[in-house]
Image: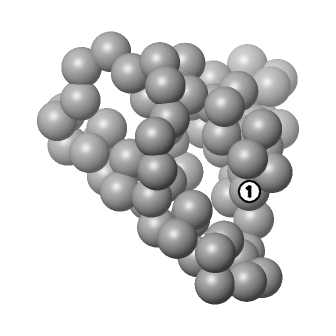
Amino acid sequence: MMLPEGTVPQTAELDRAEPHPMAAAGIIPSTAVMVYAPRENAEIDIILGLLRLSHEFACGKLGLVDNVVL
């Protein structure tokens, strides 16, 4: 999934995603992350929040985003 620039480190801190290996290698944009499958109901809410953020980013609905609020 692609996230706004500046939110990837915070997303990784949630322990629900990590930078995509190809992004780390510089092959694809640094905004690409791999999201882990949820194991508990609370994690589903986090993943849905990330999905909403990614969708808004892809649709151009966001300006500069440097903070993740789910």
Query: Residue 59: horizontal and vertical position, in percent?
Result: 20, 43
In the figure, residue 28 lies in which quadrant?
top right
Q: Residue at x 66, y 31 (%)?
A: 10
Between 28 and 69, the one lying in front of the other is: 69
Image position, residue 64 (x, y; %): 33, 15
Residues 25 and 63: in front is: 63
Asked whether residue 5 appears in the rendered view, the answer is no
Total marks shown come to: 1
Q: Is residue 58 left or right of residue 6?
A: left
Q: Residue at x 56, y 65 (%)?
A: 47
Residue type at tag 1: Arg
Mark 1 nearby-residue class (10 Å; few <14, some 14–19, many ≥20): some
Name the residue nearer the viewer: 66 or 2: 66
**Is residue 67 shown left or right of residue 35?**
left
Q: Quadrant of residue 6?
A: top right
> Which percent across, then down, holds residue 41?
64, 84
Vertical comparison of 61 with 52: above or below: above
Task: State the residue position of label 1.
Answer: 16
Identify the image's colour scheme: rainbow, by chain, secondary structure or one colour.
one colour
Drawn side of residue 54 relative to residue 58, left or right: right
Residue sitting at x 31%, y 38%: 57
The x and y percentages for residue 54 are: 40, 47
Q: Is 51 situated above or below 1?
A: below
The local secondary structure at tag 1 comes to loop
Viewer-proximal residue among 25 and 64: 64
Give the answer, above or below, for where 49 lies relative to 64: below
Which quadrant of the view contains residue 40? bottom right
- The answer to whether residue 24 is visible is yes
The residue shown at (50%, 35%) is 68
